[in-house]
Image: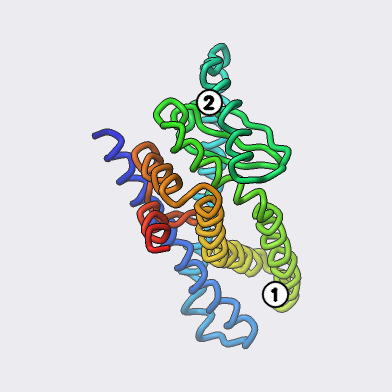
Amino acid sequence: MIRELRHRLVKLFIWAQMLLVSAVVVTGGLYALALLLENRFLLGLVQSPAMTLSATLFALIALLWLSGFILRITLRIVFRKRTVSLDLRERLGKIGPETLQRMGLNLKVRFLVRRRSSNAYNGKNRILVGEKFLQQSTDDELRGIIGHEIGHIVKKDNIVKVIWTLIPSLTLGIALGLLIGLSHGQAESAFVPLMTGIGALLLSGIPLNWRMEYRADRFAAEHLGTDVVVRALSRLKTLHFGGFSFSHPPLSRRIRRLQQG
Ligand SMILES: [Zn+2]
């Protein structure tokens, strides 16, 4: 019940973020256009909403970053004495390499348990599986989630994400410099396009991120069987927020796509 409510709140919050980012991109885009065309009428019209929306997005990003940082530190202090049970570590240490073998892959990957988490993550040559997922899942469900993360590693999705962020960021920096020049160095003229650029970057990353998720699902399904991955995602749905986000498509849609083949 509490989980249901929490997931509803997360969904509402993500919708609000999407709307805010879209509004920033639209008003900020018009603002930049007015600057470029030196159109005073359009500038007068969009300046105030563009500034307010950009400031709201900036405050939201700063607040999320700061609260996340404080929460992480607090949890680390509170739970510093609690270690992950040996059973869970051993289980992951056994099923992880075994999954790689089943997939016919010769990769050097370390398998680690992530405390208090119900999800799974990947980094450079390592896969982290949440403690809660490990506690609640069957061996097949665990294999499915590991297979998905292996898919990300094999397809080098993290590197693609860095490149995808770096190139537009550089372009954004250059465009910003030009705009500051055009607006005779006014601070707010730079702030609005900066937030617009960040918003555009966030929105443009959605199709790429979602495609990577579908691809990792498919990769796992091809190597482990569709049923294993569907079961893993269904388990994840009972533990973790299953709706869409900037980084992930809804779990129900991922499951449907796998089942449709
Ligand atoms: Zn993924």
Could you say where residue 112 lies in the image, as x and y percent from the top left?
61, 29
Helix, strand or loop at disc 1?
helix
Left-right relation of 171 to 250: right
Name which residue type carries label 2.
Arg
The C terminus lies in which quarter of the figure? bottom left
Helix, strand or loop at disc 2?
loop
- Residue 226 bears which disc, if any? none
Front-lying residue, 222 or 16: 222
The N terminus lies in which quarter of the figure? top left
Identify the image quadrant of residue 128: top right
Name which residue type carries label 1.
Leu
- Identity of the residue drawn at 50% across and 66% down: 24
> What is the residue that sits farthest to the top in this orientation?
81
For label 2, the crowd category at 10 Å Cα-Cα, with few meaning under 14, some 14 to 19 and many 20 or more, is some
Q: Is any atom of residue 247 visible in this view?
A: no
Residue denoted by label 2? 115
Could you say where residue 229 lies in the image, as x and y percent from the top left?
45, 47
- Mark 2–mark 1 Cα distance, whole angstroms, equals 46 Å
Residue denoted by label 1? 179
Could you say where residue 17 lies in the image, as x and y percent from the top left?
43, 56
> What is the residue that sits farthest to the left in this orientation?
1
- Identity of the residue drawn at 72% across and 71% down: 180
